[in-house]
Every structure is written in structure tokens, then in C-alpha cells.
Amino acid sequence: MGYFFLILFLLCLLVPIFSYVIFPWYMKLSVMNIIRSKNNYSSITEWPSVTIVFSVFNEEKVIRRKLESLLNSDYPKDKLQILIGSDNSTDQTHQIIEEFVAQNSNITLIKKETRNGKLKIINELVDMTSTEHLVFTDANVFFEPLTLKALVYNLIAKDAKMVCGNILKFSPKNQGISDQEIFYMNFENQLKYHESLKYGFCVGVEGGCYAILKSSFVKVPDGFLMDDFFITLDVIEKKGKVLFEPEAVCYEDVNDAPMIEFKRKIRISLGNFRNLKFYKHLLFPIHQGFGFAFFSHKVLRWFTPFALVFSFFLSYAVSFYFSFFILVSLGYSLLIVLPALTIYLEKVNIKLPLVNSLGHFILMNFALLIGYIKFISATNESAWEPPKRNV
């Protein structure tokens, strides 16, 4: 019985190790010999018309810089439209946008007098667009001048149906959990790029910056919080390319408050499990192609909290048969207090890299677990409110 518990314990540990270490390492090795051609923007003799679509709610801190970054793009100005939907903003967001509207005929603001939620806003805005090439973004994501061309280039020259931008996180204050979130985002970007090179798809685009053909866009049903992931899976289901473009660089401020990010991760977890229920058939065949990447990159991560909880109890069970595991079980017990210690350290801005990283990892997995509980309890959570901006 002792060996049985030990095998179960090791299998539980394999879940996060495979998803966070083995699979990314395998993907990196898989693309080492792939020739990566540079984008030849000069080969495009005529750029198509593009509409940038995004929703806002009380974004007075970032909306001016956002619009300036879009207008400073080197994309042809006469081919660029900006369509903004305000979800009943109550601060100075409307006034700031209207300043830009007065000076730029290609910016349109749609104001809602009641809260609708991001999904409804986006679906309505898409109905108003007249271009085949669409770019979706968030108010706190700032574009480099080349970003739009890099996104659209993939739709034209590489026959992509959807293109994921290269969002780089930054922290103006360099406090709290900013280091951990920046590291994780860079890690994710690299993995998505490798997936894109190997398979012709990346497992999930970031809603903060992506391009898509309007003919490939699907309206997301109510209740699906992770609209970007839902749309990604729909494109892949229809055998469309979803590419990651490293030259489509943009910047997003990172949350430095642990509890704000904790609540955001709960919401993300709830949305992910809803998407998994809807698209679970895409997991098969699970040993190859998208099924393997989907399972390894996403699904194993979503079930890592359960693996960690089971391995905690199994470490105590194994300790009855192997005395060495008494130390392992004690170590697990100490890990339980790490999230609280991490929150305290980040509040007083003390950085202990190993402690902060482990505590952040456990705290975010606890958020995933709560998200699953909300999922099985059929929580109808769909209200949308952006996190506090740090810029």
C-alpha cells in the first residue's frame, strides 16, 4: 500500500511539472531547427482597411495614452478606424475620448447609459464594423508603431485567421507581485510562439491585443467570461491558423496587488472551465496536435490545484510507510502559510524571490480552485469591471 500511495504522490507532482516544465522544454526543442522568416512588410503594396475595437469602463487614467499609441501607428491613417464602446463610464473617460473624436474623424465612441458587460459591448461593436480585418484590444494596452502592421501582415501574408500580439508587461512602481506576473507573461509568450511555429496555432490569444478576420469572428454566448479564449478555440475548431507574432509588440501595466490579481484569476478560472466544458471534444486525440497542446498547456494547469491538494494528503499517507516523507509532509505544511507571508512581504515591499514566487504560485492555484467551485455551483458571473490601473 505504501508504494501505491507513493506512485499516486509522484503522479500528482507530475501534473504541474509536465505543464510548467516538461511541455515548454519539449516545445522549445521542437522548434530549434525551424527556419523563422522575417516579415517583409514592403511586399504589401496595399494595406487593407482595419477597425480597432475595444470597450471601456472608467479608464480615465489610461485612455489618452491608449489613443495616442493607436494614432501614432505607422499603419496608413486612411485605412484605420477606431470603434470604442463605453459601458456606462462615470469618470472622465467620455470627455477625453470626445477630445480625440473632435480632431480625428476615424474615431467613433458609442456610449451606453446602463451597464451591459464587455461581451455584449464587443458583440454590438462588431456588428457596426464594415471591414474584414479587425483588431481587438484593451484600454490599458499601448501599441508600438509597428504593431498593427505586424498583426495584419499575418492575416494577409501567412493566411492566418487570428493573430496574437506580443504583450509585454511592465510595472511603473515595481512593487508587489509585479515581478512574478511579468515573468509568467514572458514565459507564456515564449511558449505560445513556439506552439505557433510548430503547429500553426497557439493555445489561446490574449484579449489585450489580437487581430482576426471578421468572417472568423464568432459572437461569444452570455456567461463565457474568457471571450478571447472562446474565439480562439472556435477558430481552431474550424481548422484556422492562430499565430503568435513577436513583432506585434505592445505594453500592459501589471497588477501589483496580490488580492486584486487573486480575484482576477478566480474569474479567469471560472471562464476557463466553462470553455473547457463547451470545447472538451477538442482534447481528442489527446496524444497529438491541438489535443496534446491544449491538454499540456492549459488543462493540466487548470487541474494543478487538485494535484497539489491530493499530493499534500498523500505525503502524510506515504509518511506512515517511508520515514523520509515525514519531512516532506512537514514541508508541505509550511507551504500552506506561504501565500499569507507573500501578501505581507509584498505589502511592505520586501522581496524574497523564492518565497514570493512559491507563495504567489500557491495563491494563484488557490484562485483556480475557487474558480472551479464557482463553475460547478453554476455561478452566473458575467459582470465586467477592469482592475485598478497602475499607470
Image (cartoon, rainbow, N blue to C red):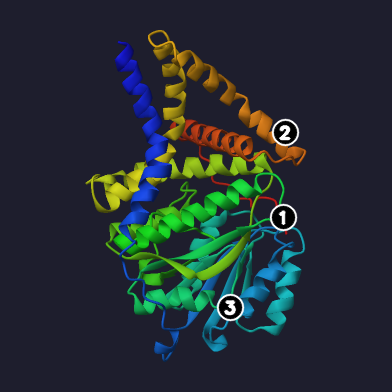
| Kind of residue at badge 3 | Pro
Can see residue 199?
Answer: yes
Residue 204 versus residue 132 in the image, above or below: above
- Rendered residue at 29%/57% (across/down): 237
To which quarter of the image does residue 216 belong? Answer: bottom left
> Which quadrant holds the N terminus?
top left
Decide: few, some or many residues near mark 1? Use Cα within 10 Å; few <14, some 14-19, many ≥20. Answer: some
How far apart, in angstroms, are the residues tagged by discs 2 and 3?
Answer: 40 Å
N-term mark: 1 or 3: 3
**How far from the left and from the top, in percent, is residue 280?**
31, 44
| Kind of residue at badge 2 | Tyr
Decide: few, some or many residues near mark 3? Use Cα within 10 Å; few <14, some 14-19, many ≥20. Answer: some
Helix, strand or loop for disc 2: helix
- Rendered residue at 55%/42% (across/down): 265
**How far from the left and from the top, in percent, is residue 139?**
63, 63
Which residue is at the front of the view, 374 or 369?
Answer: 369
Residue 265 versus residue 99 in the image, above or below: above
N-term mark: 2 or 3: 3
| Kind of residue at badge 1 | Asn
Residue 272 versus residue 124 in the image, above or below: above
- Rendered residue at 54%/62% (across/down): 167
Q: Looking at the image, which residue sits at the far front? A: 324
* Residue behind mark 2: 344
* Residue behind mark 3: 145
How far apart, in angstroms, are the residues tagged by discs 2 and 1?
Answer: 20 Å
Q: Looking at the image, which residue sits at the far top? A: 320
Determine whether, in the image, residue 289 is placed left or right of residue 383.
left
The numbered disc on residue 390 is 1
